[in-house]
Amino acid sequence: MKLLVVEDDVRIADIVRRTLAEAGYAVDVTHTAPAGVEAFEIETYDLVVLDLMLPGLPRGGMDVCARIRELNTDIPILMLTGLDSARKRVEGLDAGADDYLVKPFHLVELLARVRALLRRAPRALAPVLRAQGVTLEPATRTATRAGRTIVLTAKEYAVLEYLMSNAGKIISSSELIDHAWDSNYEGFSNVVQSYIRYLRQKLTLPGEVEIIETRRGAGYVIAADE
């Protein structure tokens, strides 16, 4: 899943980014209200972590929250603030935030609130994915095939989930990077190839049919069930 963090304090933003990334999320970070709005207008995210006191717009995070709600009424928004007052909490919730976390906060609580919001999001309620004899369970991030449970890393899950969600469609490496890694990823170009190999090793035992097909020069595809 891909998250957007809008936080003007660079140190806090980096801590939040690293914490979320270590939990398996792809994370983009911006530091101003206009940049946050622009990022949301360009990219697709599953959740937004939004600071209240942001430069660049008259009401800071409130304006960003309102604009996000104009574009998407369902995406979860977790608002961060150093102002611990009932009035500010109410203003944030009225602007469209789903939850509120006051600074300083414990990182374990941040992760717990992110997980809770994602569970309640409409997308999180999507049915279990099935294709070519493989079942993918979003709640546990595990796959099953031929009666055996296959434990996946966060990145393996993200890649497989996207391929299975788009069963029958050829997905390019760049599209997978956009989904499973953050927008500033500048690592090795063969990272997708590596994760496809990891998935094949986990999903396919000797004698079983390989479910992830490579279409040379185009990308990867999992055939849709008929």
Image: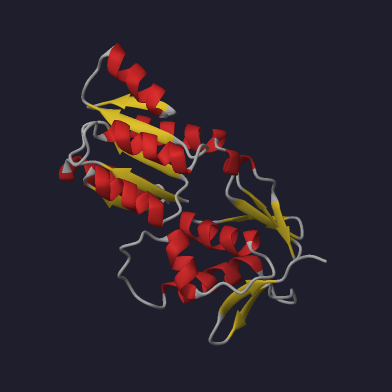
Nearest the eye: 96 or 206: 96
Residue 106 in sight in this render: no
The residue positioned farthest toward the bottom in the image shown: 216
Is residue 70 positioned above or below 219 on the image?
A: above
Query: From the viewer's perspective, is 50 left or right of 210?
Result: left
Q: From the image, which quarter does the C terminus lie in?
A: bottom right
- Count of numbered tags: 0
- Image x and y of residue 133, in percent: 76, 63
**Residue 208 sits in quarter:** bottom right
Is residue 220 positioned above or below 155 on the image?
A: below
Task: Name the residue located 74 percent from the left edge and 67 percent from the top edge.
Answer: 224
The residue positioned farthest toward the right in the image shown: 226
- Image x and y of residue 211, in percent: 69, 72
Is residue 114 positioned above or below 173 on the image?
A: above
Residue 153 in sight in this render: yes
Task: Name the residue located 42 percent from the left edge and 29 percent from the top edge.
Answer: 96
Query: From the viewer's perspective, is 173 left or right of 91?
Result: right
Query: From the viewer's perspective, is 92 left or right of 143?
Result: left
Task: Name the residue located 38 percent from the left edge and 27 percent from the top edge.
Answer: 95
Task: Name the residue located 20 percent from the left edge and 40 percent from the top edge.
Answer: 12
- Image x and y of residue 201, in percent: 59, 71
Nearest the eye: 102 or 36: 36
Query: From the viewer's perspective, is 119 left or right of 207?
Result: left
- Image x and y of residue 97, in percent: 40, 29
Nearest the eye: 151 or 8: 8
